[in-house]
Image (spheres, rainbow, N blue to C red):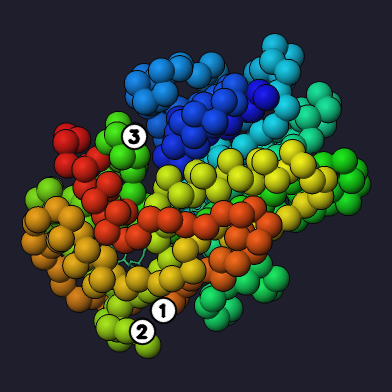
Amino acid sequence: MKILVTGGTGYIGSHTVVQLIQQGYEVVILDNLFNSKIEVLDKIQKITRTKPIFYKVDLLDYEGVSQIFEKHKIEGVIHFAGLKAVGESVQIPLTYYNNNITGTLNLLRIMQEYGCKTLIFSSSATVYGMNNKSPLVETMPKDSTSPYGATKNMIEDILEDVYVADNNWRIVLLRYFNPIGAHESTLIGENPNGIPNNLLPYVALVAKKKLEYLNIFGDDYDTIDGTGVRDYIHVVDLSNGHIKALDYAVKNKGIETINLGTGTGTSVLQIVEAFEKASGRKIEYKMMPRRAGDVATCYAEASKAKKLLNWEATKNIDDMCRDSWNFIKNIE
Ligand code: NAD
Ligand code: UD1
């Protein structure tokens, strides 16, 4: 079965491509390389002994995307491509709406034209907004707290409408919690440019002594130790969830929304401790005021994924910190 992976050279996409190839799928990657590097293809080849077909194409290029469907009989799409920095989306909302929404509309129109109606979409726990209490359940009301989050919400709604209009679609919306970790080969992982906003990449740079200390945003939350609690999930577990979602979609027409999380929360201080253990390095930190827009606690109710997809996370925080560290420690 031939699968198109948009954003397939990115962080989660590259791990998913590895698993797709290992499970015997034929993979075609589309990526504009805005936030990933072409060298990822060699790394995928090293891990799987297969070089995936790759097109450097932007989803905003309708003709370019159409040509991929013209050339290949694409039977399903896993759609990762999108811009994802929450803070940046507040600064340049039009770029985010254009890239994420227009890009997805192009993809959907082309899929429809070529009769390809199987889609797995990368949504995010951000759609739960600030007002729901964890564990977060798929049926809870949605909200947007940034243009980035609004694009995820809108795409979810667009896909619901697409299904209502044509019940032949097979769509799974996957809401990810906080993906961290890297492939155990240490060949692929997350390596953001500049100073990271997210916790794990920041902690890793402190461990490498590229940054002096971690700013912990808030120690007065109503949590186990006062610091923010999140549902961190190993990127390999997360990728595996996509394979299960694809299996499900191939067998079932319909649209389903499914959380991909572990169902357990970990605090910032617990992450610091686990990362110190994994790296053997001291992580210096300073307590700072709360970061605007943060919630105290965010973790998934993960039972729908287990029931519908027969999927559950297998790796713990120590595995995640070890694999993150093994990947990042050798990178300049
Ligand atoms: P990433 O930036 O590593 O990967 C996204 C890829 O899409 C990049 O390689 C980028 O070059 C490509 N891309 C972006 N716009 C494109 C366009 N118009 N045309 C073609 N390619 C384009 O991000 P990731 O962490 O792998 O995230 C993948 C998806 O999962 C995104 O949609 C993101 O919003 C979503 N998500 C990520 C997280 C997270 O914490 N990483 C959490 C929830 C949801
Ligand atoms: C972020 C995104 C969210 C996305 C999620 C998963 C923001 C505002 N939200 O959420 O949309 O779905 O990632 O990728 O970016 N922290 C520190 N110091 C730091 C960085 C973070 O103390 O330098 C704390 C935060 O306050 C939070 C926890 O670490 O309690 C995790 O933060 P982060 O990695 O940024 O993820 P989220 O805020 O959960």
Dot 3 alpha-carbon crowd within 10 angstroms: few under 14, some 14 to 19, many 20 or more? many
Residue designated by label 2: 223
Q: CA distance from mark 2 to mark 1?
A: 7 Å
The residue lying at 50 percent from left, 44 percent from top is 239
Q: Earlier in the sequence, mark 2 or mark 1?
A: 2
Query: Which amino acid lies under the numbered mark 1 shown in the image of this protein?
Result: Ala
Which residue sits furthest top? 71
Query: Which amino acid lies under the numbered mark 2 shown in the image of this protein?
Result: Thr
Query: Which amino acid lies under the numbered mark 3 shown in the image of this protein?
Result: Ile
Q: Check disc 3 and report its element: helix, strand or loop.
A: loop
Q: Nearer the viewer, mark 3 or mark 1?
A: 3
Q: Which mark is residue 84?
A: none
Front residue of 63 and 111: 111
- Quarter holding the C terminus is top left
The residue lying at 67 percent from left, 73 percent from top is 140
Q: Which mark is residue 296?
A: 1
Tell me if residue 3 can be seen: yes
Front residue of 201 and 308: 308
Q: Are marks 2 and 1 in contact (CB under 8 Å)?
A: yes
Please state the total of marks drawn on the protein image: 3
The residue lying at 53 percent from left, 68 percent from top is 300
Q: Earlier in the sequence, mark 3 or mark 1?
A: 3
Residue designated by label 3: 188
Q: CA distance from mark 3 to mark 1?
A: 31 Å
Residue 315, given in percent of the width and then of the height, sits at: 38, 55
Residue 73, given in percent of the width and then of the height, sits at: 73, 18
> Does residue 31 appear to the left or right of 179 in the view shown?
right
Dot 2 alpha-carbon crowd within 10 angstroms: few under 14, some 14 to 19, many 20 or more? some
